[in-house]
Amino acid sequence: MTERFAEATGTSVIGGAERRSAKSLLALVVPVLVVGMLLALVPLWLGGSRVLMTVAILGLAFASYTVGFNLIFGSTGQLFLCVGALAGIGGYSAAILADTVGLPIVVSVLLATLASSLTGGLLSWIAVRRSLGVIFTGIVTLIFALAFENLLLGLGALTGGENGFLIQSGRDSFLRSRVPAFYLMLALALLFVVVHGLLRRSHVGWAFRALRDDEVAAELAGVNVARYRVYAALVGAGMLGMTGAIYALTQGRVSPTTYGFAEVDVVVVVMLAFGGIGSLFGPILGAVTFTAINEFLEGFGHLRLVPYGALIIALFLWIPRGLIPTVADWVRRRRHQQ
Amino acid sequence: MTAIVLDGIVLGLQFGLLAAGLTLVYGLGGVLNLAYGQMAVITAMTVLFAMNAGVPTLAAVAIGLVAGGLLGLIFDQTLLRPIYRRQGEARVLLSLLLTLGVAFMVDGFLNWRYPTAGLGLQISGGPIEVLGIPMRRGSIVGSVIILIVFALLFVFFKGTSLGRAVRSVIEDEEGARLVGIDPSLMLRIILIISGVLAAVVAVTQSMIRPVTVTAGFSITVFALIVTVVGGLGSVTGALLAGIILGVVNSLATSFIGTFLSLIILLVAAAVTILIRPSGLLGVRE
């Protein structure tokens, strides 16, 4: 209670490096609103073009994916290379539940979210129980992602195989018109940022920072590292699944490439690393930037991978921590000098 | 049954060779080279262009091997410099991301410039009988080459003092430095070997089916899985894991069906990692 009071009044019970996290709720809400309002202007600018609006919606889906991945990897150090697969579990579950089983759309989306969340939690639980390191968690989840892709191709009767299938549910609803779909996806991305921000401000956030900084020390200090990792995976994977489900409904179709490893995971890792691993708004910045770059380079076909690759190399060589933490540090240092 | 197992062994040898080049670099340098498949593709294209230019096949293959070694050397001298400055998981992560960037660049360029190119080496002559089963000549020649390469690797690592020096760095970098071994020189040697191995992968694979410009990613993924199952830094482990996974894949394909076989392969790999995180023959840290 005292902590919350301290946070609400803007005073800090803990000094130094952690002061940022203890700032008032405004420090979370105001940037979210500002970012939200800026992004809300996008349809005014692109609204006339259905193609560009579709790109923008995909960009927002990626923003949400990256927030979910950031929660799992950035906050608790679990390299989940199955972002696409978890989103795909959401997307395919929602589509199949709504179309084949005939459940209402909202119920389908919620069940799909639950399915992804539990899958992510299970993967995390396995990784934690076997105490796999970052790289091995990455490889096991990569294997899971590849298996999922093959399962989609193999279970053609249910999933439509390579081509996927068109979703009939919600065909005439607002989900299929671009501008409302854009705002729905924007609201989702902002909601996830707020959830992540609130988690970081709560005692869960303290546990996250402790176990990220030094796992053994955190364990010794009484933080149940295993439990918080699984929590993060449950919440993060739920975000991925919900995004995958809602995105599928706004597109009216699902296909393996919508959730492929090369199409989703690689991009999400790059977006997060660009924006800043572990930072609250890094995912949004990364998603917006790379969606724009990708669209700008669209006309070059395969050749666009070349500047993309060069950019990745340059980024990690010169600003390995990502843009937001690097700039934030620079600003803080400037302020200290004055 | 024998035919299925033999098929599996042929595939397994390919898997094992894939992993060998990756596992050495990972075991020694803590560098996860995600551009490994692209290295193989570049050497395949080198061989292809040399052959198209009228160079005899054997000479073209030799050029490919040299190109592979050069690629390894270039990697070591440029991209890996900043990676070596880091330690532990930060090193693995940075190497993973930087080599991913390289993989993108190579894939993007090759797919744009030569979208339909593919290297296929025809081995003339009819099938050869092994244990009463007729096998394609290309598979047999490829397998024999792979076995010879593995034999050479074993001789190098067990029999020569240079190879022993390399192994000492894999086991304990500080210790090796203390007895006067230069780890960065050993790394350079390993990267050159890894590049040559990538070229051998390209050549032997092209004897069974064409190596296309798009093959890079799947080569890397299989190499990664076999590497992890075999244990990081262990060439024997790579060979063993390759053969086991190859036979598993072949059995699953014939008894269960093509689409599930890959999933079974992946599950087998995942289970191995979960039971023995250090791999079949890896050193437990």
Image (cartoon, coloured by chain):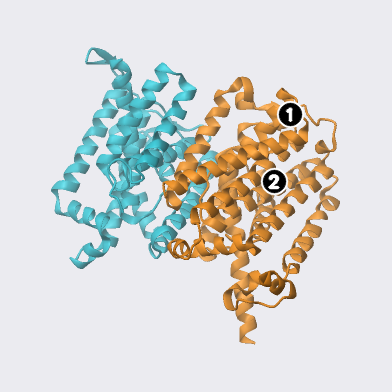
Residue B216 in the image: above or below residue B264: below
Front: mark 2 or 1: 1
Q: Quadrant of the N terminus of chain A?
A: bottom right
Q: Give the residue drawn at x 59%, y 51%.
A: A69
Chain of residue at mark 2? A
**Residue sitting farthest toward the front:** A1
Residue A145 in the image: above or below residue B23: above
x and y, in percent, of residue A142 in the image: 49, 41
x and y, in percent, of residue B184 in the image: 29, 61
x and y, in percent, of residue A271 in the image: 61, 54
What residue does disc 1 label?
A98
Residue B228 in the image: above or below residue A8: above
What tint does the image give chain A?
orange
Q: CA distance from mark 2 to mark 1?
A: 20 Å
Q: Which mark is residue B165?
A: none
Specify the quadrant of the image occupied by residue B60.
top left
Residue B201 in the image: above or below residue A187: above
Q: Is residue A317 visible?
A: no
Which chain appears cyan? B
Horizontal arrangement in the rendering, residue A195 relative to residue A205 (left or right): right
- N-terminal of the two: label 2 or label 1? 2
What residue does disc 2 label?
A61
Residue type at numbered disc 1: Ala
